[in-house]
Image (cartoon, rainbow, N blue to C red):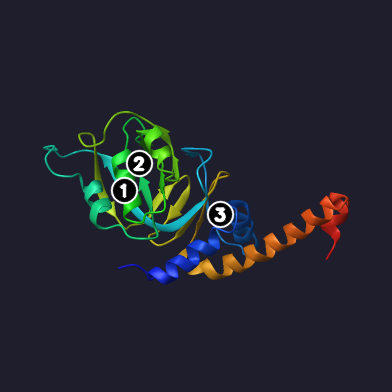
Amino acid sequence: MTMFNKEERTYWIENYKKFPTANISDAMDNLGLRSGVVLGLHALDVYQPRTAGFAKTIRQMRRKTAFDGKALTKQASIIDTQTEYGDLLVIEATGLTDIATGGAMLATRAQMRGVMGELTNGSLRDIDEIADLKFPVYLGSTSPVKSARFMETVDTDVPVFIGGVQICPEDLILMDRTGVAVVPSAHLKEVLEEAKKIKAKEDRIEDLVRGGMSLNEARQQK
């Protein structure tokens, strides 16, 4: 059961997508909130669109139990049946980058379920195919090695750590070409309002600079 209904999810997603991650980072800093900037990952495609969604967390580890190869992996089953509109997959791979946590088939199914993108400190494969989907992804690395025999999902809908940031289920994730910002669900309203003020000020400064004013003078205008 999600914290927000579809209408509420749409509201937050569409409003946060109006802002770059830089504005959200600055807003959280101004409000004295813990940094929500995820470090050490890279965009799958530098041309991928900005996206936002609510964290659907999955935690994976190196497999300790045998996999018979017949049934879907637990991760695939979660994506196939438990994701919904507005989710953004957040997969903690516990440092495993030699194995791909997923590929194009899982990304396609996630996209069909209304998932907005994926964030993982692990690896993915089928990179060209995922890029063709316009499915936004931030990831730790790439690997052609499939996960089924080597990795297993041990938790879902639990707090995870990605790039130095704790991400809880239903936290809002904003991703653009600059990076990834995580906003705790309890602070969505105040961070959004602060981001609006920051962007309005930056837009005024940019207009003044384009009009011929020096940057120093423009920044001093009220």
Q: Of helix, strand and loop, which one carries label 3?
A: loop
The residue to which callout 2 is attached is 94
Looking at the rendered structure, the kind of residue marked 3 is Ser
Mark 2 and 3 residues: CB-CB less than 8 Å, in contact? no
Label count reads 3
Mark 2 and 1 residues: CB-CB less than 8 Å, in contact? yes
Q: CA distance from mark 2 to mark 1?
A: 8 Å
- Write the residue at 43% across / 38% down: 131
- Write the residue at 40% across / 33% down: 128
Would you say residue 102 is visible in this rendering? no
Tell me the number on the disc at residue 35: 3
35 and 5: which is toward the camera: 5
Q: Is residue 154 above or below residue 32?
A: above
Q: Is residue 35 above or below residue 3?
A: above
The disc, 2 or 1, on the residue closer to the chain's N-terminal end is 1
Tell me the number on the disc at residue 59: 1
Looking at the rendered structure, the kind of residue marked 1 is Arg
Q: Position of residue 26 (x, y in %)?
A: 64, 56
Q: Quadrant of residue 120?
A: top left
> Crowding at label 3, few (<14), some or many (≥20) Cα neighbours within 10 Å?
some
Q: Is residue 143 above or below residue 10?
A: above
